[in-house]
Amino acid sequence: MRIVTISLTLICLCLFIAARPVAALDSNLITRLASDDSDEKISAIHQLIEDDPAKAITILHALSDGQLALAGSRLIILNGDRASDAISGEKIETVPANTDAITINNRIRRIVATMLSSLDIFASDSKTRLNSARYLARNATFDSLPIIEKALQKETNPEIKNRLMVARSMASLGSSDAAVRLKAVAYLKNEATPATRQLLSALLVKNGDNWQEPDAAVRSTAQASLKEIDRKLAYGENLDRIFTGLSLGSLLLLAAMGLAITYGVMGIINMAHGELLMIGAYATYAVQAFFRLHFPEWINWYLPAALPCSFLAAAIVGMILERLVIRHLYGRPLETLLATWGLSLFLIQTVRTLFGAQNVEVANPVWMSGGITLLPSLVLPWNRIIIIGFAIAVLAGMWAILSLTRLGLFVRAVTQNRSMSGCLGVPTGKIDTLAFGLGAGIAGLGGLALSQVSNVGPDMGQGYIVDSFMVVVLGGVGQLAGAVWAALGLGVFSKILENWSGAVIAKIAVLVFIIVFIQKRPQGIFALKGRTVES
Amino acid sequence: MRSRTVLKLFLLLAIGIWTGLSAFTSYAADTIKVGILHSLSGTMAISETALKETALMTIANINAKGGVLGKKLEPVVVDPASNWPLFAEKARQLLTQDKVAVVFGCWTSVSRKSVLPVFKELNGLLFYPVQYEGEELEKNVFYTGAAPNQQAIPAVEYLMSEDGGGAKRFVLLGTDYVYPRTTNKILRAFLHSKGVTDQDIMEVYTPFGHSDYQTIIANIKKFASEGKKTCVISTINGDSNVPFYKELGNAGLKATDVPVMAFSVGEEELRGVDTKPLVGHLAAWNYFMSLKNPENTQFITMYQKWAKKENLPNADKVVTNDPMEATYIGLHMWKQAVEKAKSTDVDKVIAAMAGQTFKAPSGFVVKMDEKNHHLHKPVFIGEIRPDGQFNVVWKSKGPIKAQPWSPYIPGNAQKKDEPEGI
């Protein structure tokens, strides 16, 4: 009798366990998923995919986005203010207080990404499939070969198909069939990415007497493919080097263009030029703060609004300086130098008092973050591209003002022969102020551009004053075209040098080059020819 | 006749000022002066300003609880403006003119090296709150930051471990001065001892305040594509970190491909950066704001309240970081030592500092070593989160004793683990 009871209980127990395996599994799985031990977590992830691939997709996406959390024994997905149960999917009104985010490290992040890419490749949304195919084309291993083959059979989208073919070739390198490997190695010739380069060069490693790749034909094809990939990668690198040089050059140009007017055209040694840049950058910061406060929904478009503000802020400060100080020192370069240097200290301290000594944060708008991938090895960041375009626009605007408007005509006339223009009725005093204001305003625009790539702080101008004078002097005083060539030349030159010798040496070498150059050719690259008063 | 009257007036005035001053100094003798020597402007202001605030907050907090030896602490704040020779000048001013009992200050090693002769000459006392390269042990300095074996070595070991990605190639990227150079020398020797060859190590330096990281990031990408798992160890200091991380995000270099481990980037430095593209990049410290324990909660609330009261910029978003914690620990330990010595005399306080303990916001009881002037500290490795905080992905089992003389530098084995001349 007793035996019967015991066996009955046992049977019941077995039935009970069999009836709710999922629930029991889940709580165990959840604790393992939330475990601090990476191995536990990984085994839980594998099990999750085996048990329920559909649910695994949502849970793994949440995990890789850092949205997965543990509330007591319940697994929830946090998305901003909203929360939902990860397993049942039902909405949770109030997030429980004992919520603990489940954190992952890079190792798990990589594993989750690999898992997700093999799950997402069968998604109905073509964008998700493309992303996953792109991931596979960078990270495919022999293990993922069956999934890639399966996906390839179903896939119709040519772009995704192309990515999958690359992924298949990468994965096939692990195959034991030499013919398959040979085909894969030959196919990879067209895919010049760091990942394929790494894979192919790994084949050509010799361990003792054995090659990593036993078949000689595969090796020679791999060698040829590698050569082709190297050629393409080097091409991308050279393009990148030119682009970074142009980008640095455009920044130098924006920083120096204002000085090309005040120093180059008007002949004022303005040591406070860097501070005019700084005022432009702070004006940008102020506009950003204003937008954050009053129009948070338009925050991504604060930059266009900052354009006139930074121009005007710097121009007004410039004109005040000209009226109060510089005007009385025309023709006395040494005194101008000292006075403007004093002014620069004054401006730095004023800004420090108003905004604090620490750098302020000027964020890139969303449309200026990230970059476009031109070649697999060449990513051009948006902020750099936009700044190059901006430099061209400012340059065009300045050229138009100087050569097409009446003000420009007067400025050129006054700088060439002051007394003659005065005799002809040009209000020389007013023109000086306006021209200085224009130079200062353009410096303000330069500050706006600089705020997008470097730090904005009270002493930021000090770092650019030397560079700006370098560009103007190298280009030839009194020349706009000279400044353009000098800025771009210096940018490309110092980037190529930096690549070869490191940033510290490059900086020194550029300065030495300028000293030598100015000694050989004091008038700069382009000398102003004409009947100016001095000549 | 008239000039004599003027002279007399002048004399009277001078006497008046002098008596007034002496009255003031006699009043001031009821306080203990504490010097605060941190750059409040220039390239290091991004990191050091918060340390000044932490020191002022801790002093206010100690004063509110009755001060030290029945006297109130009186902070003397100076700004050496990220200018290394000015650090020495300001230190001399603090010790000779203001006659401070102790100085809390410096961030970069070059500033510490610059003030060192002053502290030795005048027998002052300096508390240095930042992780550094070691290779120094001075009687007049207490180091409350990490030595290389409390930060750099565990961090590289983590990167080489399976969880860290099993890195085989290393880019050592730093600002060009003594801390990154020495740390990288130690790391290179350490990597050699682990069988990493020179061709798998790339060492790059940039000037202070460098803002164009395009070439360097392109070179890192190229280096990483030449095979084997690559990681970057960054000892970039100051505001250069902002353009570096911005460029890193824009260039699409992800932490899963090439993780960046930083030794001088904490919560404060990341405040000016969009951290969403940076998730997964790493930092090694002895404290993170995201640690959960009662001491840390108290420390964070205290600082947040202080920021609101003082109306600091972005007061609602202030963060705490490792060197701030080290400043906080340092001030409290100095207070305990003064109370133990019953005097602010430098030699007595130095003797009393040995073996001091403090329940730190890191959640561990940290101890000042009996001999080597360094703390026993726990080590944490954190990953950048989308909100600019760090997730701890690895931590040491307990506090680790500092080795200021790294065993990976030849000739260090014979050096004594205590300052000369005690």
Image (cartoon, grey):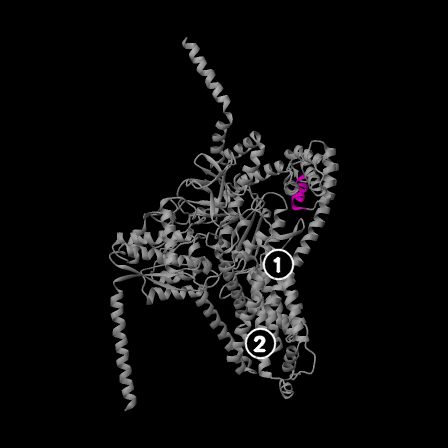
Tag shown at residue A436: 2
- Residue B133: x and y in percent read 46, 52
Q: Secondary structure at mark 1?
A: helix
Residue A195 located within the stretch drawn in magenta = yes
Label 1 resides on the chain identified as A
To which chain does the residue with label 2 belong? A
Q: Quadrant of the N terminus of chain A?
A: top left
Kindly tell me whether residue B109 is visible in this rendering.
yes
Query: Toward which corner of the image does residue B363 lie, by quadrant?
Result: top left
- Kind of residue at disc 1: Arg
Q: Say whether disc 2 or disc 1 marks the residue closer to the N-terminus.
A: 1
Q: Look at the image and say whether residue B327 sits in the magenta stretch.
A: no
Label 2, label 1: how far apart the Cα atoms are: 28 Å
Q: Residue at x 48, y 33 (%)?
A: A30
**Position in image of residue A332 (x %, y %):** 55, 82
Total numbered circles: 2
Mark number for residue A458? none
Q: Which residue is mark 1?
A: A384
Along the horizontal axis of the image, is A427 left or right of B26?
A: right
- For label 2, count other residues whose C-alpha is less than 10 Å away and answer few (under 14), some (14-19) or many (20+): many
Nearest the eye: A426 or B390: A426
Camera-side residue of A517 and A42: A42
Magenta segment? A193-203
Name which residue type carries label 2.
Phe
Q: Residue furthest bottom?
A: B1
| Picture layout, residue B50 above or below residue A408 | above
Pointer 1 local density, CA inside 10 Å: few below 14, some 14–19, many at least 20: many
Secondary structure beneath dot 2 equals helix
Of residues A61 and A255, the one drawn nearer to the viewer in this rendering: A61
Report the side of B313 relative to A166 (left or right).
left
Assess whether mark 1 and mark 2 are in contact (beta carbons under 8 angstroms).
no
